[in-house]
Image: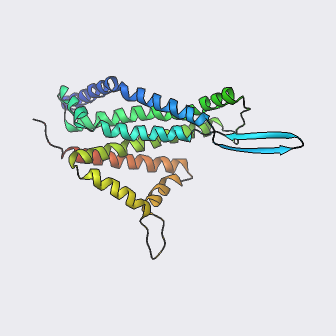
Amino acid sequence: MSFVSVKFLDVVKKQYAFKVRSYMGSILTLIFLQVIAILLASISTNYSMYGSNGISITSHVYSSDIVLIFTFLWAFITAILITTRAYRYDDYSFIATRNSSNIANVLYLLTVSIFAGVTAMLSSFLIKSSAYFLHEAYIYERVSMSTIEYMTGLSASVLYVCLFAMAGYVIGLLVQWKRLFMVVIPVLFIGSMFSTNTYHSNPPVLEVITGFILQESSFLLFSVKVIAICVVLFLASMTISKRLEVRL
């Protein structure tokens, strides 16, 4: 390995370690949001009642979906925040390049995405415990999950968080490059929710894009798709960051 490559890797490691130490506030925010989501999920709004022969049964449905939604939003917003000038100028504490800064940012996002995905998946146990103690309810799982199925779900949640983080990172860089994207991106997003092919009655563009990922039955193909999209977004971020103005 050449001296230049070693030096580059050392810079990336230092920047990554700096970000992990300095951005602990984002982790605390994640924990706070997940706690709120767990409390909300513990208050079931979907329930049904059955009665027969003088016996009544009330069934409540609890889900960790709201925890995942809060986690996805957190990852998206956090990724946008680290592209702002205040965060980018922190990198000038090191002898760094745009490439090293981008790689360090992506490594940080991957690290916190793994943590966020794991904690979001594990929140289901806390929701069950809260439901039991708050409502004195008997916990019944509709489908019992094997260890492999649970690990598959955990991996999928991590991949989803990574996808939202990378999307937020690219969008943040686009906004830093051209403020016009603050208007263009929301317009494109809203438009994609309703734009259809009038002649063939095709579904909205956004539905097609999300269906490309969400409707994948094979976890292996799902993983390949998400990883491929994340790689494309990473390459796009490298290209966009080179166009940002140089700090004097």
Vertical placement of residue 200 versus 157, above or below: below
**Residue 111 locus on image (x, y percent):** 40, 32
| 144 horizontally vs 76: left or right | right
Residue 43 versus residue 18: which sits nearer the camera? 43
Dividing the picture into quadrants, the one containing residue 142 is top right
Vertical placement of residue 11 versus 204, above or below: above
**Residue 132 locus on image (x, y percent):** 68, 29
Whether residue 181 is visible: yes
* Outermost left residue: 248
Assign the C terminus to one quadrant of the image.
top left
* Outermost top residue: 21
Vertical placement of residue 131 versus 171, above or below: above
Residue 158 versus residue 139: which sits nearer the camera? 139
Dividing the picture into quadrants, the one containing residue 52 is top right
| 21 horizontally vs 240: left or right | right
| 219 horizontally vs 49: left or right | left
* Outermost front residue: 54
Assign the N terminus to one quadrant of the image.
top left
Dividing the picture into quadrants, the one containing residue 12 is top left
Whether residue 1 is visible: no
The residue that appears at 72% across and 45% down in the rendered structure is: 48
The residue that appears at 82% across and 40% down in the rendered structure is: 56
Residue 116 versus residue 16: which sits nearer the camera? 116
